[in-house]
Amino acid sequence: MPFLTVPNWQISWTPLLVLGYLFYLLLGAMVFQLLEKQAETHSRDQFQLEKLKFLQNYTCLDRQALEQFVQVLMEAWEKGVTPEGNSTNPSNWDFSNSFFFAGTVVTTIGYGNRSPSTVAGQVFCVFYALFGVPLNLAFLNQLGKGLNAHLMMLERWVQKPGRAQVVQTLAVAVFLTTGTLLFLVFPPLVFSYVEGWSYGEGFYFTFITLSTIGFGDYVVGTNPNKHYIPLYRSLTAIWIVFGLAWLALVFNVGADLMEKFLQLKWHKPDLSLAEGDTTKLEDEPEQPRIHIPT
């Protein structure tokens, strides 16, 4: 167990890490509450106002009938049916959308905007995820090893005596820059153009997806008023797989650096004390030995 070294005693830094983790969660909760609660209250009041206006315009309806209709809309949305449009909307379970859904299952993204509604589909989803999630982890691990091997080959190819640290830093910089451009910078431009989002919304969707957080508030290919090419969501699923591998490597590197920083900071010996003790011993005159005659 890692320890924080203090003269004459040691403190385990695991409780400190736990406290720091809990503090980080509490900090996030307070910030999100500060940023989102007022906006939620405004949206809720606005929705109630719209319902009142609707009842005033259509006097043949009462509040109970309206609430029942809203409940029907919510149930339809929970089952993946878009309330907008009509019955001619593209199916949520055509091959392209099903392929995309399968990718969200094995990658544990789970947007939540679509899920199996039949018992057979739910049972299959359980066993599909049971075997698919480990398979996905093994695939991403192998893909990460391949990316790592290419980085090592690049390092050996350009390595020169006395420049190992520089080359290693350069290789990591190239890896991070290229991955950032391919998976975080350019994709939001495509999503903004196809989906009609702002660049900020596209970037938000990109990171939330690749980090497997997957809130489901933004999902590609769900606007019934837009015509998508059949391969759009399938290509997005492939982009997600490679983006997951890249971001997982970045997270692993960040975690390793954090652990090394903690070990370096909390396990660093107090050299000043050690040198002081050594100097004291060296400077201290040798005590005369007393010989006792026998």
Image (cartoon, grey):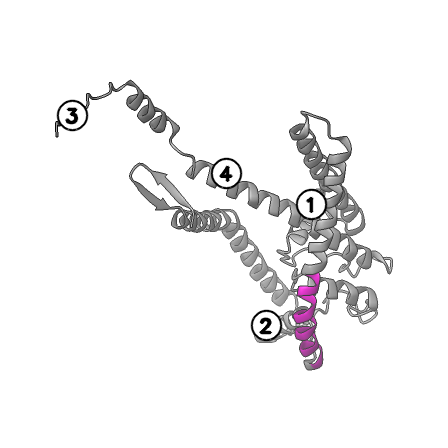
Residue located beneath label 3 in the image: 291
Q: At which x and y percent is residue 5?
A: 36, 39
Q: Earlier in the sequence, mark 2 or mark 4?
A: 2
The amino acid beneath tag 4 is Phe
Q: Which mark is residue 67?
A: 2
Q: Is residue 174 left or right of residue 13?
A: right
CA neighbours of label 2 inside 10 A, class few (<14), some (14 to 19), many (20+):
few
Q: Is residue 131 visible?
A: yes
Q: Nearer the viewer, mark 2 or mark 1?
A: 1
| The residue stretch that appears in magenta | 120-136
Q: Is residue 113 visible?
A: no
Secondary-structure class at tag 4: helix
Which one is in front, 154 or 194? 154
CA neighbours of label 3 inside 10 A, class few (<14), some (14 to 19), many (20+):
few
Q: Nearer the viewer, mark 1 or mark 3?
A: 3
Q: At which x and y percent is residue 68?
A: 61, 75
Secondary-structure class at tag 1: helix
Q: Earlier in the sequence, mark 4 or mark 1?
A: 1
* Spatial separation of the CA atoms under disc 2 and disc 4: 56 Å
Which one is in front, 120 or 168? 168
Q: Is residue 260 left or right of residue 293?
A: right
Q: Residue at x 75, y 56 (%)?
A: 220
